[in-house]
Image (cartoon, grey):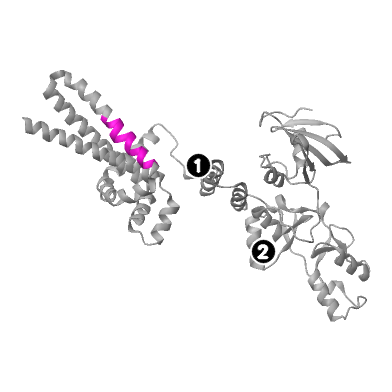
Amino acid sequence: MTTTLVLTALAILFLLIFSGLFSGSETALTAASRARMHQLERQGDGHASIVNRLMENRERLIGGILVGNNLVNILASALATSLFIQLFGEAGVLYATAVMTTLVVIFAEVLPKTYAILNSDKMALAVAPILRPVINVFAPVVVAVEAVVRSVFKLFKLDEPDDEALVTAHDEIRGAIDLHHKEGSFVKGDRDMLGGILDLQELEVSDIMIHRTSIESLNIEEPIEDLVRLAVDSVYTRLPLWRDEPENIVAVLHAKDLVRALQRAKGKVAGLDISRIAKTPWFVPDTTTVQDQLNNFLRRRAHFAMVVDEYGEVQGLVTLEDILEEIVGEITDEHDMEVAGVKVLAGGAVSVDGTVPIRDLNRAMDWDLPDDEATTIAGLVIHEARQIPDKGQVFNFHGFRFAIVERDRNRLTSLRITPLARRRPDAAPAA
């Protein structure tokens, strides 16, 4: 009798150990870094290779672990009930319930899962070789369980999980970047740079282009002496050339090509033919994603393109530098002009030119103004106010106060933005 009780107690202990192994393995394998496992596998780590194979079919993995975990828990509870009934009679059922609940919660759930969370990669590598044969053994049971689950979903006309509803890889990476920034692992510059790379696929060239009203261009029919002088005086190396009207871009003049032509002409400007020096412009749709445009620039070994809308009208221009600035921030050199687009004022207010892009202001000030409905700060105010405000009007929305400082006809040229003490992102505009 005593030997039987001892063997039963040892069996219960053995099953609790297995229960803890299953619980900890589930947490470790779901929390393990897939990127780190992939890198370790590339370096020849066999255990990492097993982890990656198990994680390829996450549903089968979790199903196998749950089947094994419930099996050992139920068996351990049944043995404990039998043991305590032999020791205490009918009251043993209550004792067995209290003891097994305590043991399972502490030693088979909380303790192994806590350890697995703190050492997910290490534990995943350790348990993977043990779990692989177990998952293979329980595979038929898991397949049957999955079939039953799908049948229940169809019976009650419930929607089955859709892969498209799951978090995408981009969202997962973006969430990790924001989390590490919040925890202090990433400085703001690193977060902006990594986030800028992820944004390339979501942005269109119309979001980052230089608008046609801000383009510096030249009339190709100007006297050649004037054209050369204006091109040399410009801070830009590539200049669009138009004929009849500024929107009719017919060529693009590169400063380097102009210098070469002048060298061949021994400095004689009068003999130059600007139409033979300039290159044919490259037009791209304004709906092209920034990622695709970057690839196009690299493929064509070009740095400059004109942006047109669906009607073929020129809307602006985009350069390779504009795309790179979305990743690394503003790029300046010794020839760039100092533009007072954003200026921090006393008291926390910020003076902003109306043409400043919302994304640039967010990056500079670490704000989160929405840029879904407008590209520039002036556009955001007009969208929220549902009107073109007059000078002196003030609006509160998205947790900021926007004061109109200057207006030139239908354009808001200067604004003063003040963060409110209490952010209310859903606040309605108020004049």
Amino acid type, mark 2: Phe
Do we see residue 289 in this rendering?
no
Quadrant placement of the C terminus = top right
User: How far across and how far down the image is residue 25, in percent?
Assistant: 33, 43
Q: Quadrant of residue 152?
A: top left
Verify whether residue 108 appears in magenta. yes
> Rounded to the nearest whole Å, what is the CA distance between mark 2 and mark 1?
33 Å
Along the viewing direction, whichever of 350 and 131 lies nearer the viewer: 350
Up-down relation of residue 273 to residue 336 (above or below):
below
Up-down relation of residue 13 to residue 247 (above or below):
above
Query: Disc 2 marks which residue?
Result: 297
Q: Which residue ends up furthest to the left in the rendered image?
A: 1
Quadrant placement of the N terminus = top left
Query: Disc 1 marks which residue?
Result: 165
Do we see residue 333 in this rendering?
yes
Q: Which residues are magenta?
A: 103-117
Q: Quadrant of residue 151?
A: top left
User: How far across and how far down the image is residue 266, in percent?
Assistant: 88, 81
Up-down relation of residue 287 to residue 365 (above or below):
below
The residue depicted at 17 percent of the width and 31 percent of the height is 79
The residue depicted at 86 percent of the width and 39 percent of the height is 406
| Label 2 residue SS | helix
> Are circles 2 and 1 on residues that touch, CB within 8 Å?
no
The residue depicted at 64 percent of the width and 65 percent of the height is 298
Up-down relation of residue 230 to residue 308 (above or below):
below
Amino acid type, mark 1: Ala
User: How far across and how far down the image is residue 425, in percent?
Assistant: 66, 32
The residue depicted at 64 percent of the width and 54 percent of the height is 327
Verify whether residue 8 appears in magenta. no
